[in-house]
Image (spheres, rainbow, N blue to C red):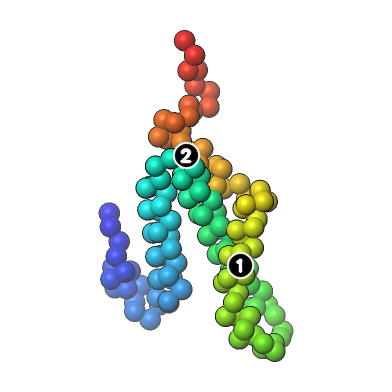
Amino acid sequence: MSLSVNDLNSSLGASSISADMVSGMAASAKLTSTIQGAGTDEEMMSACEEFEVYLLQKMFQSMEESAKVFSDDEEEEGGGYVDMFSDQMYQSVAENMVKSGQGLGIAQTLYESMARNAGIIPAEGTNTEQ
């Protein structure tokens, strides 16, 4: 089943789709094609790490939005600049977490699952010795 922006637009209504949602869907589609197009183990692991970075970045952005809802402060000085560069900051923090091994472990789990499904590594509990 294929889903296009027009399908989303008609099902959700034109006013409910934000630019963030559209860019998020585009980034998600890019990551999916990168993972599916990986030819080597290194490329597949790199794509899985990119996916984990993307998830962490979105998690941080959601946390910030939630914190703003409960904040008593109106607008802080320099808030426009913080908003302008917060996406880059969250992406950088997420990349550093994943590269240093301090991420959530999603990349490794995703890689192992994909490798098992592709038959690259045997499933757990499967005896491959004869």
Determine the residue positioned at 34% across, 77% down: 13
The location of residue 107, given as percent across then percent down, is 55, 47
Position of 43 relative to 85 (above/below): above
Q: What is the crowding at mark 1: few (fewer than 14 residues within 10 Å), some, or many (at least 20)? A: some
Task: List the residue tagged with mark 1.
Answer: 90
Indicate the secondary structure of the residue bearing disc 1: helix
- Vertical comparison of 55 with 14: above or below: above
Residue 76 against residue 106 in the figure, above or below: below
Point 59% across, 77% down: residue: 85
Towards the viewer: 19 or 11? 19
Location of residue 61 in the rendering, given as x and y in whole percent from the top left corner:
59, 69
Quadrant showing the N terminus: bottom left
> Identity of the amino acid at label 2?
Asp
User: Can the viewer see residue 59 in this picture?
Assistant: no
Dots 1 and 2: beta carbons under 8 Å? Answer: no
Q: Nearer the viewer, residue 39 or 106?
A: 39
Q: Earlier in the sequence, mark 1 or mark 2?
A: 2
Taking the image as drawn, is residue 105 in sight? yes
Q: Position of residue 21 (x, y in %)?
A: 43, 71
Q: Which mark is residue 25?
A: none
Report the side of 99 relative to 34 (left or right).
Answer: right
Circle 2 is placed at which residue position? Answer: 41
| Secondary element at tag 2 | helix
Judge the density around disc 2: few (<14), some (14-19), many (≥20) Cα neighbours within 10 Å. few
Q: Amino acid at mark 1?
A: Tyr
Quarter of image, res 87: bottom right
Mark 1 vs mark 2, foreground winner is 2
Image-quadrant location for residue 29:
bottom left
